[in-house]
Image (cartoon, rainbow, N blue to C red):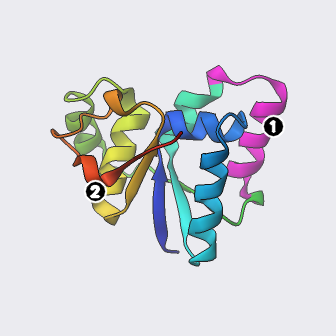
Amino acid sequence: MNVGLIFDTSALLAHVRLERLSAGELVGEVAENGDLVGVPSLAVLDALPHLKQDDRGRLERLVGGESHTIVVLPLTADDVLEVDRVASLITGGWGAAQAVMAANRHGVLLATTAPADLGIGVVIHADDVDVLS
């Protein structure tokens, strides 16, 4: 499994709500390279309360193993303290913190619709963030 891009909570919401064509295009580009889009488990948990019926069903199918383009990234015991440290430096919450940590760890872009929530310049470099249009 090679992760080629990370979605934060906002990018995940945009993707499952079908709000941003650019989210789906990114997933396709990553898949064409033989990679997967990583979605932090905390981002999934952050997103669920904001979804209704069809959108929630799409998310459930994505994380339930039906997707061959998206992988849910686990929160390991070794990651907990680092996620807490990052979360204390940003406004985006636990899902965004795990996304920042994962993007930094994998050395890949972090896709978002909410760049102000990510602590750009503090915990992630601006060049490592792809703002979905």
Secondary structure beneath disc 1? Answer: helix
Name the outermost residue toward the front: 133
Residue at 63% across, 75% down:
32
Horizontal and vertical percent position of residue 126: 25, 46
Residue at 37% across, 43% down:
98
**Residue 81, quarter of the rendered image:** top left
Q: Residue 31 bears which disc, if any?
A: none
Position of residue 116 in the picture relative to residue 122 (left or right): right
Q: Is residue 100 above or below residue 102?
A: above
Q: Is residue 14 above or below residue 78?
A: above
Residue at 17% across, 40% down:
121
Q: Which residue is mark 2?
A: 104
**Residue 68, quarter of the rendered image:** bottom right
As measured in the structure, the alpha-carbon distance from the residue carrying label 2 to the one carrying label 1 is: 30 Å
Kind of residue indicated by mark 1? Gly
Position of residue 120 in the picture relative to residue 103 (left or right): left
Q: Are marks 2 and 1 in contact (CB under 8 Å)?
A: no
Horizontal and vertical percent position of residue 39: 52, 50
- For the magenta stretch, what is the residue range? 49-65
Residue 78 visible in the displayed image: no
Position of residue 24 in the picture relative to residue 99 (left or right): right
How many tags in the picture? 2
Name the outermost residue toward the right: 54
Residue 20 magenta-highlighted: no
Q: Residue 57 bears which disc, if any?
A: 1
Kind of residue indicated by mark 2? Asn
Horizontal and vertical percent position of residue 15: 65, 41
Q: Earlier in the sequence, mark 2 or mark 1?
A: 1
Residue 133 visible in the displayed image: yes
Prevalent SS, magenta region: helix
